[in-house]
Amino acid sequence: MASYDVIIIGAGPGGYVSAIRCAQLGLKTAVVEGRETLGGTCLNVGCIPSKALLHASHLLHEAEHNFADMGLKGKSPSVDWDQMKKYKDDVIGQNTGGIEFLFKKNKIDWLKGWGSIPAVGKVKVGDEVHEAKNIIVASGSVPTALPGVEVDNDKGIVVDSTGALALPKIPKKMVVIGAGVIGLELGSVYARLGAEVTVVEYMDFITPGMDGEVQRQFQKILGKQGFTFILGAAVSGVEASKTKAKVNYKLKKDDSEHSLDADVVLVATGRKPFTDGLGLAELGVEFTPRGQIKTDAHWATNVPGIYAIGDAIVGPMLAHKAEDEGMAVAEVLAGKHGHVNYDVIPGVIYTTPEVASVGKTEQQLKEEGRAIKVGKFSFMGNARAKAVHQGEGFVKLIVDKDTDRVLGCHIIGPGAGDLIHEICVAMEFGASAQDIALTCHAHPTFSEAVREAALACGDGAIHA
Ligand code: NAI
C-alpha cells in the first residue's frame, strides 16, 4: 500500500494530462489504468488511430482523383489493408509509449488494473488499497447502446467505433447509424477505401449542433465524395447473420418502414459516461439524470476529496476539454486558481475538408435575439486552397453588430482544425473582427481566408 497526494482513475487525455500537471506542481501522483497501454480511448481506439486511417485513405483519394491533374501519372496505389492497420497500430504504439515515458520522467506511478473507491481517501486496485488525499475520476466514456442493435466488434459485422478501426476486411457496403463526428470520420475512411457508405440519421440534418450553413455545405461535399444520406430516419433494429446485416429504419415524415443491406454496420449514435464499478453511488456521489458525475466549478463532487473531469462529467466529450479540466483541477489541488473557459472550446471534424467551430452558431445567436454581423469568405477566393484542390468551403465569422467583438466562427475547408485556433485566441482576448483584419497574415496561406472573413465584417473582403 502506498500513500499519495493524488490518485487519478483513468489515463486518457483528462487523466494523464492531469497527472503530469499534478506532478509538475509537486504533488505525489499515481494513475490507475486497466488497459495494457496508457492514453485511454483517444490514443488507443479513438482520435489517434482514426487520424492515421484518415491520413492514409486521404492520400489514396488524392492519388485516385488529383494526381493525374497535377501531372503525376501512373497506376494508383492499391490498398494493403493489413499493412494500413499495422501503420495505424504503430502510430498508436508511438503515442501510448510517449505517455509512459512522460510518466517516468515526471515520477508518476502507474497502478495497473481497474480501480475502485471503497472509501473516501482510498483507491483499490486488484488486492491492494492505496491512500490518497484527493482522488480524481477521469474514467471517460463508452459508446451508447441502441435498442434492437447488438454490437459485436469481434465478429466485425455490427461494430462501434472500436470495431470499425480494426475490421477484418474493407466492406463493399457499409451502413453508418448516426451522422455525428464518429460516423462521418470513419465513414470517410471506408468511402475513400472503396466502400459504398450510407448514413442513416435521426435528425433532418447532419452533425447536430453545428452551424446550419456548415451542415448543408458539409452534406453536399460528402455527397460528392460518394456518401448517401437518409435523414429523418430512426433505426429500429439491426438483424445480423455471420456475413451480412440488415438495418431496419422508420422515416419520421410518414412512419414508413424500410431496410438496408450491409456488409458492415457502424453504430455511431453517441457516447455515455463510463463510471461502472467505481463505487461512486455507494459513496453518495451525485449524478445527473444522464449518468454524468455532478461537479462544482472546481470539479469537486459533493463528496469531499473526490473530483471528476472529462467525458464522465457534463460538457462536450472532447479530449481537449478533458485535458483542460485535468490541468485546471491539478492547479486547484495545488492551491492555485485552475480555470476553464467553456465558451471557447473548439470542435473539429477531421474529414476532408475539415470542419471546425468555436463559440456560438448564427442560429443560437438569433434565438438569443443578439444583433450580429456575419462575415463570410469562400476558399474559392484563397489562392493556396485552389492550388491544392481544396477550394470548397468557407470561413464564417460572427461578431457583435455594435462592438465588432468575435462571438463565433465556423469553418469548412482545408486546415480548418488549425485555422480555428486564431479565433480561439481572439475570443480569449476579447478581440474584434477589426483586430483580426488589421493583423498581417502571410501569403499564400489558408489563414488568409480567416482574415478575409474578418474584413467581410467591416468594409469588405478583398478577394470576394
Ligand atoms: P454524436 O452525438 O456526435 O452523433 C450521434 C448521431 O446519431 C446524432 O446525429 C443522432 O441524432 C444520431 N442518432 C441517435 N440515435 C439514432 C437512431 N436510432 N437512428 C438514427 N440516428 C440516430 O455521437 P458520435 O458520433 O457517436 O460521437 C460520440 C462523441 O465522441 C461525441 O461527443 C463526439 O464529439 C466525440 N468525438 C469527437 C471527435 C472529434 O472531436 N473529432 C471524434 C470522435 C468522437
Image (spheres, rainbow, N blue to C red):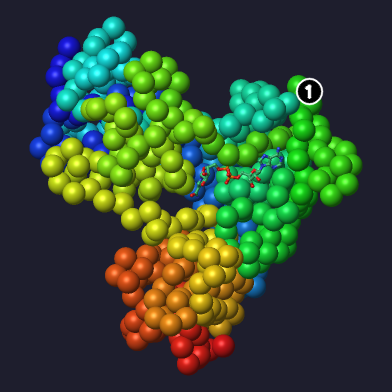
The x and y percentages for residue 341 are 33, 55
Residue appearing at x 32%, y 32% in the figure: 301
The x and y percentages for residue 85 are 53, 37
The x and y percentages for residue 358 are 45, 62
Q: Relative to the observer, which residue lies in front, 224 or 23?
A: 23
The amino acid type found where label 1 is placed reads: Ser
Q: Quadrant of residue 95?
A: top left
Q: Secondary structure at mark 1?
A: loop
Query: Which residue lies most toward the front here?
Result: 369
Q: Is residue 273 left or right of residue 175?
A: left
Q: Is residue 151 above or below residue 92?
A: above
Q: Relative to the observer, which residue lies in front, 168 or 311?
A: 311
Tell me, yes or no, if residue 15 can be seen here. no
Q: Relative to the observer, which residue lies in front, 463 or 231?
A: 231
Q: Quadrant of ligand 1?
A: top right
Query: Which residue lies most toward the left here?
Result: 26
Residue appearing at x 69%, y 40% in the figure: 177
Q: Is residue 120 above or below residue 438?
A: above
Residue appearing at x 49%, y 56% in the figure: 348
Residue appearing at x 46%, y 68% in the figure: 408
Q: Is residue 169 left or right of residue 365?
A: right
Rendered-image quadrant of the C terminus:
bottom right
Q: Is residue 373 above or below residue 314?
A: below
The x and y percentages for residue 459 are 48, 92
Q: How many marks?
A: 1
Q: Which residue is mark 1?
A: 241
Q: Is residue 421 left or right of residue 129?
A: right
Tell me, yes or no, if residue 191 can be seen here. yes
